[in-house]
Image (cartoon, rainbow, N blue to C red):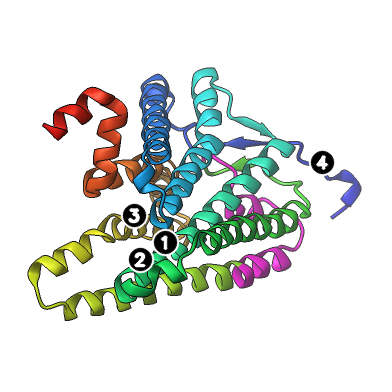
Amino acid sequence: MDVGNLSTVTQFVLMGLSDLPEVRYPLFVVFAVIYQITLAGNGAILLALGMERKLHTPMYYLLANLSLLDIFCSSTTIPKMLHNLLSGENSISFLGCAVQLYFLVALMGTEVFLLAVMAYDRYVAICFPLRYALIMTQVHCVQLVCGTWAAGFLNSLLHTVSTFRLSFCKSNLVNQYYCDIPQIVALSCSSTYMAEMLALVIGGIFGTSAFLTTLVSYVYIICTILRIQSAEGKRRAFSTCASHLLVVCLFYGTAIFTYMRRSSSQDSLSRDRLVSMLYGVITPMLNPLIYSLRNTEVKGALMRVLCGGACSRQAEH
């Protein structure tokens, strides 16, 4: 093929919602409401955790970071999707796609590492309660959190550079509502071996390490809870990690279904896009609801923040 006759892609077209033009405006309303709930829910948790002094502990410091990640992650994709639905234009510039992919992969990667740290925190709290304050000090907690953010953004930098160093001269139609590595790599007209191997090796090492940390932590947690004699003790121990366990199952369940299952049929591609929306849009909205409904301390802090001093005085009486 004559390289000189190849036209370089300068923009991509996000095809994720383009096959539903008749419901474009209803979808805009639905996703706008979801986005507002996501911002309000996670913002309320951040406000409650910040104002409630007794919640200034490692567990809730990690929860605050999870809420920040949910806000940032949804803000990486949903505003652009809302703009496309409202305007009917599905294009995104080459640079805009690279920036969106970088922050999306960075934030998702950071969340994977943060969930592992949160599982480790619950492991120490339940399996070594007397040593918890010595192990999970404020300095150690900050170091762990900084490490998760640094690892997530460094991992994303490697993937983004390897992906956008490829040559794009074929189709510019991205079969997704946002820019993601598999869909962008599939459009390349140059060898994708290095990009695919980097995604497989680096992503596999980081992702598997975080997943195994989370899994092993919960194996030890469950074994420890089962050894507790009293039913009340088991209930109290499980209640401290139930919310996080639900969030982990939701996150990994949708992530595995999104990235481990790929098909070329049109019905499967449409189904994959719907699951991707669950992964990237619905999950950040559900996380604050899970924590506010399952965790009595967070629920109480939210009630005091939303209702003000009147609720606090009424609760005391």
Q: Of the residues shown, which amino acid type is indicated by label 3?
A: Val
Nearest to viewer (mark 1 / mark 4): 1
Tell me the CA gap for discs 1 and 4: 48 Å
* Magenta region: 177-202
Tell me the CA gap for discs 3 and 1: 11 Å
Q: Can residue 226 be seen here?
A: yes
Badge 3 density bin: few <14, some 14–19, many ≥20, Cα 10 Å: some
Nearest to viewer (mark 4 / mark 3): 3
Nearest to viewer (mark 2 / mark 4): 2
Q: Percent from the top left, x then y, of residue 207?
A: 52, 67
Tell me the CA gap for discs 4 and 3: 45 Å
Left/right of residue 229 with respect to residue 180 in the rendered view: left
Tell me what residue is drawn at x 37 percent, y 24 percent.
23
Tell me the CA gap for discs 2 and 4: 54 Å
Left/right of residue 302 with respect to residue 153 in the rendered view: left
Q: Percent from the top left, x then y, of residue 215?
A: 37, 73
How many marks are shown on the rendered structure? 4
Tell me what residue is drawn at x 63 percent, y 65 percent.
199
Tell me what residue is drawn at x 34 percent, y 76 percent.
128
For marks 1 and 4, the one nearer the N-term is: 4
For marks 3 and 2, the one nearer the N-term is: 2
* Picture disc at residue 7: 4
Nearest to viewer (mark 3 / mark 1): 1
Badge 4 density bin: few <14, some 14–19, many ≥20, Cα 10 Å: few
Q: Is mark 1 on a helix, strand or loop?
A: helix
* Closer-to-camera residue (5/168): 168
* Picture disc at residue 122: 2
Q: Can residue 15 be seen here?
A: no
* Picture disc at residue 118: 1
Q: Where on the picture, by quarter, is residue 120?
A: bottom left
